[in-house]
């Protein structure tokens, strides 16, 4: 951990910059969530979504805007921008071959799915929203291999927590979408007994392992899993399941690991209550990057050796002695 922080001991000070404080949410919201952190080299900027999980008796609203962090100047500039057509409750996102792909949770009238966005013009296009005619429930996060195979999580958030979508038609789980052939299939689901409500997804640098977080019914529930699972990704030519050997790798002590990322050295980062937990590839907790008291880290994004942390209240960044797994 000292090597990662580039310090010699616990006595050294490590600076975590606070770049932006988000405005307060609407009166019907219990909190704000900033997710979907994704970097685009075309604009040299980071995009992320804002969600308003509702208070009891209300529904999540579908906002017409997302946040963009412009990195082209001396100081990062955080601003609202407006995709067209607008996204409907966007959440996780991933960059692939010139486009940003959003996991869109949807609402009563717009099915959830995957939406492609041009990072420069902000033009959007729906690319996937059903499995054999059945609506997805609430797609939460997505990653895409260099060969164009997407893995995305789909939970019951919209129906169970946000009161903004129809009763689920499918089990919650992890889906695999081969963007080249069009094949769509569930590769790990509630029927396996592994989880309720999968959330964040991430790939290692070799793209032979998939990491998935589980939330359970509520973040504060002691029985709510708070777990990161590790799967082996089968080769495209091997017979049988596409994901193998799913096992718990790490367990968080506060909240649950929402967005997750890996670095090129195999460390796993999870956004949790109070900061970012960092585990090694054996699931041993190395340390925590602490943010403001009372704040909750939701997701993060590597840009070079800077780790940008999107939390409920603020946007932070910290310079580390590593880089992310994704190449551009």
Image (spheres, rainbow, N blue to C red):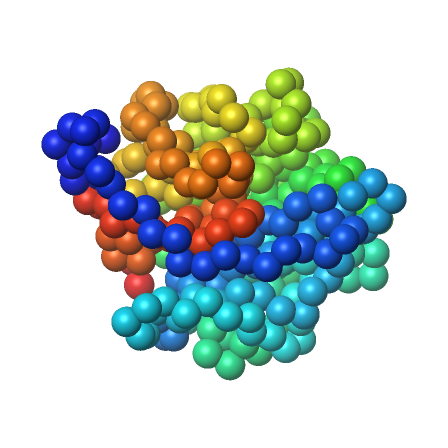
Q: Position of residue 297 (x, y in %)?
A: 48, 42
Q: In which quadrant of the rendered view does residue 98 lie?
A: bottom left
> In the displayed structure, does residue 280 sit left or right of residue 238?
left
Q: In which quadrant of the rendered view does residue 206 lie?
A: top left
Q: Position of residue 162 (x, y in %)?
A: 76, 45
Q: In which quadrant of the rendered view does residue 44 lie?
A: bottom left
Image point 18% across, 29% down: which residue? 11
Image point 28% across, 53% down: which residue? 306
> In the displayed structure, does residue 109 sit left or right of residue 239?
right
Q: Is residue 172 visible?
A: yes
Total marks shown come to 0
Q: Quadrant of the C terminus?
A: bottom left
Residue 310 versus residue 13: which sits nearer the camera?
13
Image point 22% across, 38% down: which residue? 13
Check the image and name the residue furthest to the top.
Answer: 223
Check the image and name the residue furthest to the right.
Answer: 57
Instruction: In the rendered view, tell whether residue 248 sits above or below residue 215.
Output: above
Residue 262 versus residue 293: which sits nearer the camera?
293
Residue 119 versus residue 80: which sits nearer the camera?
80
Q: Is residue 201 visible?
A: no
Q: Position of residue 1 (x, y in %)?
A: 23, 30
């Amino acid at each position: 951990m000292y090597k990662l922080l580039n310090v010699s001991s616990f006595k050294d000070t490590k600076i975590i910059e606070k770049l932006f404080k988000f405005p307060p949410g609407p009166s019907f919201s219990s909190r704000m969530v900033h997710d979907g952190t994704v970097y685009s080299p075309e604009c040299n900027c980071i995009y992320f979504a804002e969600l308003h999980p509702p208070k009891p008796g209300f529904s999540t609203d579908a906002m017409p805007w997302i946040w963009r962090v412009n990195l082209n100047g001396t100081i990062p500039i955080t601003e609202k921008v407006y995709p067209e057509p607008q996204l409907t409750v966007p959440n996780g996102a991933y960059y692939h071959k010139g486009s940003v792909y959003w996991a869109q949770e949807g609402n009563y009238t717009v099915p959830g799915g995957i939406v492609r966005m041009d990072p420069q013009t902000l033009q959007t296009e729906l690319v996937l929203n059903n499995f054999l005619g059945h609506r997805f429930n609430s797609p939460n996060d997505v990653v895409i291999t260099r060969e164009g195979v997407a893995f995305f999580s789909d939970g019951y958030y919209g129906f169970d927590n946000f009161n903004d979508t129809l009763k689920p038609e499918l089990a919650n789980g992890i889906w695999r979408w081969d963007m080249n052939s069009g094949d769509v299939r569930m590769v790990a689901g509630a029927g396996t007994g592994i989880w309720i409500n999968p959330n964040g997804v991430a790939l290692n640098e070799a793209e032979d392992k998939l990491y998935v977080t589980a939330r359970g019914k509520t973040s504060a529930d002691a029985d709510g899993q708070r777990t990161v699972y590790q799967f082996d990704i089968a080769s495209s030519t091997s017979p049988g399941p596409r994901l193998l050997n799913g096992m718990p790798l790490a367990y968080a002590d506060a909240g649950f690991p929402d967005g997750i990322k890996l670095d090129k050295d195999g460390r796993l980062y999870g956004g949790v209550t109070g900061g970012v937990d960092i585990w090694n590839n054996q699931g041993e907790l190395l340390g925590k990057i602490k943010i403001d008291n009372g704040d909750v880290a939701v997701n993060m994004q590597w840009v070079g050796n800077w780790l940008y942390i999107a939390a409920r209240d603020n946007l932070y960044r910290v310079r580390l002695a590593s880089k992310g797994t994704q190449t551009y």
